[in-house]
Structure formats: C-alpha cells, structure tokens
Image: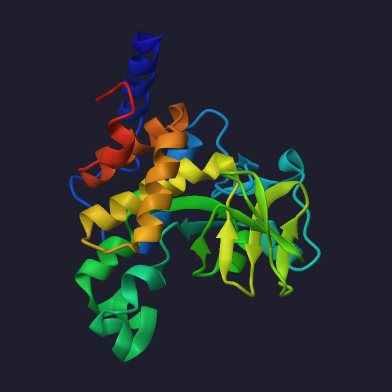
Amino acid sequence: MKKILALSFITLLCSLTSVHADQQHKSFREAKLNMVEIFRRLEAPKTLYCGCSIKFPKRGGYMPDLESCGYHSDKNAQNAKRIEAEHIMPAWEFGHKRNCWLRGHRKNCEHTDTEFQQMHADLHNLYPAIGEVNSDRNNYSFTDKLSDDNYYRDFTSNRKVKNYSRHKINGYGHCEMVIDRTREEAMPPVRARGIIARAYLYMSSRYNISLSKEKQQLFQKWNKMYAPDKNECLINSMIRKIQGHDNPFVSRSCNYR
C-alpha cells in the first residue's frame, strides 16, 4: 500500500507542469489558478466545509456539485454555485494589525506589503469553498460548540449548556457547517477540522502569528483527532513543489516524509 501511495505521489508531481515554480509566489491570482490545477489532479476532490464534489468544466476553473452533498440555499443561490479560494486563517486575522492595513485596509496591503502578499497567496492556507459559505464565514472564529436557539452543545462532552439569548444561525441543507452570526462563530463539520487546524498551526508557526491559548488548544486537539487523508497529503506535496516548502503539520503524518 505504501509503495502504491509513493508511486501516486511521483506520478502526480511529475505531471505538475502548469504550476511549477522554485519559490513562493506573491500573487493571490496566481495562487488561485494553481489551486484549480492542484485539485484537478486529486481523486474525488471536495469543497472544504460541505464536502461537495468539485467539477471542472471545459471552459476552465471549477464549480461545486451541490446535489452531491445535499446543499441548499434560500439566501444567495448564485454565490452558492461558485467556488472561492477560502483563506482558512482569514486575511483580516493576519493583516489587520499591519501598518498597510491601518493605512488602507486589505487592498493597500495587497499592493504595498511584501510579507502580507506572501501570506495572502500561501497555498497552505487556501482551500476551495462554496462561495456563499465562504462569504458567510467572514472572519469568524472557529469553535466546536454548536449553537441553536436555546442551547450550545459541547461536542467533546456531548453536554448541552443553557443559553438564554437567541442567535441568528445559517444553515445550508445537508451541509453541516454552522455559522452563528450574532456570536461571530463558525462550527465546521468534522471532515474539515483537521485541515483547518493544520492550516492555522502552519500560519502561526511560519509567520510568527500569535494565537490565543483557547485557539491553540482547539487546533492542537483537532490536529490530533483528525489525521490527514490521502488527498491532504497529496495537496501538501504538490504545494511543496510549487512553493518550495511543505506544511510540517501535514507532512509528519504522511508516508512520503
């Protein structure tokens, strides 16, 4: 099995001709194009939060197969039909304290701050997500506590905690992503938690971005509970070929180390 996996890595890496570079690129546009090519080479690629199958039309780009995951939207159906490059650690989180942001927000940072450009275009922090979910998630913090009108369920202890205030919560059909817009929190499905954790731990380590103690504990827990699957290992390997470095939080669990 390990030999088969190793051969699949070699085959995929050798075929990466249109996304080749010796150093990390600084263009977010280029990163998005690279991401399409990376996911085109995966077996059964899916969107981050909802696990919808990804389709690659002949005209180029990619789009979600909403029926494959039972996705439903009553609010922004057009945005739900597109895939966007989700910054798992939001640009606001790694950018809002920088001088460029204080002088002109995100757009100014994209044009004037070299380190921000690298963080903004870092493929280890990007993942395809349904446009509506990406927009609704905004800059909200991740949690593993599910909100409803009266309770929060702590999934670690499976215990309900009383909550007397009402919250606006977004639902997406069978997609298990939950976004509480009042508390500005998002609870991702189990399938996405390991990917999210390793992206956050990578960004914090590589760019010296401090995380709160609560966030560190949450992402370390998710990293241990939800190991990388074959596709996550392949993605990491292909990004390493493009950017010149891997995400060590992924690599340590993959057979190609």
Residue drawn at x 40%, y 58% as measured from the top left: 215
Quadrant containing the C terminus in the rendered view: top left
Q: Is residue 164 above or below residue 59?
A: below
Residue drawn at x 26%, y 39% as measured from the top left: 248
Left or right: 111 in relation to 159: left
Left or right: 31 in relation to 41: left
Quadrant containing the N terminus in the rendered view: top left
* Residue 115 seen in render: yes
How many numbered discs sit on the rendered protein? Answer: 0
Residue that protrudes farthest toward the bottom in the picture: 103
Left or right: 181 in relation to 32: right
Quadrant in the picture for residue 9 = top left
Residue that protrudes farthest toward the right in the picture: 74
Residue closest to the eye, 196 or 46:
196
Quadrant in the picture for residue 185 = bottom right
* Residue 27 seen in render: no
- How far across and down, in percent of the image, does residue 113 sit? 23, 75
Q: Is residue 255 above or below residue 54?
A: above
Way the structure is coloured: rainbow
Residue closest to the eye, 23 or 228:
228
Q: Is residue 168 above or below residue 63?
A: below
Left or right: 189 in relation to 72: left
Quadrant in the picture for residue 20 = top left
Residue closest to the eye, 2 or 7:
2
- How far across and down, in percent of the image, does residue 222 sit? 45, 43
Residue drawn at x 32%, y 42% as measured from the top left: 239
- How far across and down, in percent of the image, does residue 252 sit? 28, 31
Residue drawn at x 38%, y 51% as measured from the top left: 217
- How far across and down, in percent of the image, does residue 93 sit? 38, 70
